């Protein structure tokens, strides 16, 4: 019997205000990029350089503006955490990109969540194992429409927040980032050749916590709108 392997679909995110899609190549996530969250997770923001992990591109969950998307509670966890983040989408790549020119590589920005099976991540940390089981669950990267930098500029300040059932859980300002978006791009490009279609989750403020089935999360960033998800 001959087997026909279907061509894989390319993960893509909607571009705000258009019918266009932004194809996603690779997903980088920076850890502990807000001082209060670094302390919350047991780190020292005054000494630690940035570090990154990855999610599979097909773990992203596009969320339409104004809609409430169903977000599946993943198996094998009893402690599923929200982390609100600004997502950065790259239009140009390169190696050893200088900080002063890094923002020229950005296509746009979006609201995103780095959903985390915290119990599995904590176990992996204790055993010094990779984080994939904790960070790479199916649809564990909800992302709203990408707002082109040509329209919204390059946000370096403004409120970032997340609420659960109307109760605010995370709130901060983008200016609280330890490493700016430009610095993250420059740092990453010293380890990897970056390409158009790469996206970066730029870190989460403190206040991360568990969410349960039936609850509704609303993530918002000033100038980028909000995304709404019901955990099912």
Image: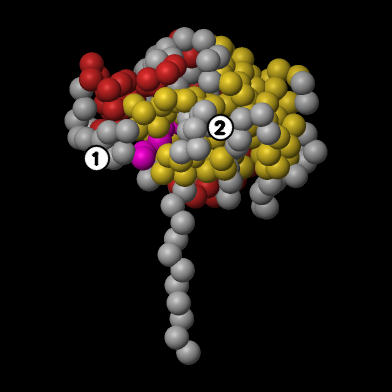
Residue 121 percent location from the top left of the image: 56, 42
Residue at x 58%, y 21% (from the top left corner) = 225
Q: Which sits in the foreground, 18 or 98?
A: 18
Q: Which sits in the foreground, 95 or 210?
A: 95
Please give the residue where the numbered disc 1 appears in the rendered image: 193
Q: How many marks?
A: 2
Compare marks 2 and 1 and give the one earlier in the sequence: 2
Q: How is the image coloured?
A: secondary structure
Q: Secondary structure at mark 1?
A: loop
Q: Does the magenta-highlighted stretch encompass residue 202?
A: yes
Residue 118 percent location from the top left of the image: 61, 39
Q: Is residue 224 visible?
A: yes
Disc 1: CA contacts within 10 A as few (<14), some (14-19) or many (>=20): few
Q: Which stretch is magenta?
A: 197-203
Q: In 3D space, how far apart are the residues under numbered discs 2 and 1 (Cα atoms)?
A: 26 Å
Residue at x 46%, y 68% (from the top left corner) = 6
Displayed quadrant of residue 171: top right
Residue at x 58%, y 46% (from the top left corner) = 139
Displayed quadrant of residue 66: top right
For residue 59, above or below residue 105: below
Please give the residue where the numbered disc 2 appears in the rendered image: 144
């Amino acid at each position: 019997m001959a087997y026909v392997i279907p061509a894989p679909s390319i993960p893509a995110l909607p571009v705000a205000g258009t019918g266009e899609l932004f194809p996603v190549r690779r997903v980088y996530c920076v850890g502990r990029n807000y001082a209060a969250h670094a302390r919350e997770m047991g780190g020292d923001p005054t000494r630690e350089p940035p570090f990154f992990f990855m999610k599979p591109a097909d773990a992203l969950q596009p969320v339409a503006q104004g809609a409430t998307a169903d977000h599946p509670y993943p198996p094998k966890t009893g402690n599923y955490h929200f982390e609100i983040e600004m997502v950065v989408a790259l239009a140009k790549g390169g190696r050893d990109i200088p900080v002063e020119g890094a923002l020229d590589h950005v296509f746009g920005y979006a609201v995103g969540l780095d959903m985390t099976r915290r119990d599995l991540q904590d176990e992996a940390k204790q055993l010094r194992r990779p984080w994939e089981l904790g960070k790479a669950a199916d649809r564990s990267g909800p992302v709203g429409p990408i707002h082109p930098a040509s329209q919204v500029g390059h946000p370096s300040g403004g409120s970032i927040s997340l609420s659960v059932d109307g109760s605010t859980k995370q709130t901060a300002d983008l200016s609280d980032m330890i490493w700016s978006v430009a610095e993250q791009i420059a740092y990453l490009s010293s380890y990897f050749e970056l390409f158009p279609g790469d996206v970066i989750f730029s870190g989460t403020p403190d206040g991360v916590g568990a969410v349960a089935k039936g609850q509704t999360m609303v993530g918002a960033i000033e100038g980028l709108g909000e995304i709404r998800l019901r955990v099912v």
